[in-house]
Amino acid sequence: MYDPAQARIEAQSVKAIIEKLEGNSDPDFRVRALLIKEQRAELVKHHLWVLWTDYFKPPHFEKYPQLHALVNEATKLAGASGTKGSADLKAADQLLAKIDEIADIFWETKKA
């Protein structure tokens, strides 16, 4: 039921859109692409928040004290100051890396 993969899929979409924006100057395409990128970035935040609020429990936060900061940093990278509000490819890569760190912790908790 819970899985960080959906957040990663949406973040990969965000990155792909940013890459396509770099090579396209068509104003209509750019408007549509930016709108879709913002929607996908919002979905990244949603999926991360669901994990944070519904899946992860106090024992997880005790065992992985960095988890609060990771989720906070990832949602900010998906938000207005990150990939939602910009076309920064570096921010998209950072977002994917944070999601991967969260996923590593998630799968560790599933083993327990």
Image: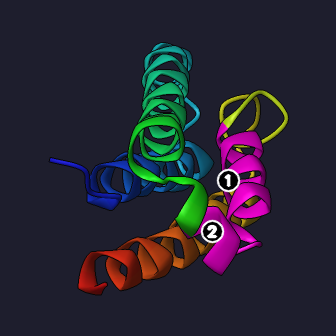
Residue 70 is inside the magenta segment: yes
Which residue is disc 1 drawn over? 74
Where is residue 6 shown, x and y percent of the image?
28, 50
Earlier along the polypeptide chain: callout 2 or callout 1? 1
Amino acid identity at mark 2: Lys
Number of other residues with Cα within 10 Å of mark 1, as a class: few under 14, some 14 to 19, many 20 or more: many
| Number of marks | 2
Q: CA distance from mark 2 to mark 1?
A: 6 Å
Left or right: 71, with 43 as reference point: right
Magenta span of residues: 60-78
Q: Residue at x 49, y 44 (%)?
A: 48
Left or right: 60, with 81 as reference point: left
Q: Residue at x 33, y 79 (%)?
A: 107
Where is residue 81 shown, x and y percent of the image?
85, 35
Mark 2 vs 1: CB contact within 8 A: yes
Type of secondary structure dominating the magenta stretch: helix
Which residue is disc 2 drawn over? 98
Q: Residue at x 25, y 50 (%)?
A: 2
Where is residue 111 shown, x and y percent of the image?
26, 86
Q: Is residue 47 above or below residue 46?
A: below
Where is residue 87 shown, x and y percent of the image?
70, 42
Residue 1 is marked as none
Query: SS class of the residue under badge 1?
Result: helix
Q: Specify the color scheme.
A: rainbow
Amino acid identity at mark 1: Ala
Q: Residue at x 56, y 66 (%)?
A: 59
In the picture, the quarter occupied by the C terminus is: bottom left
Among all residues in the image, which is located at the extreme left? 1
Along the line of sight, the residue nearer the viewer: 50 or 41: 50
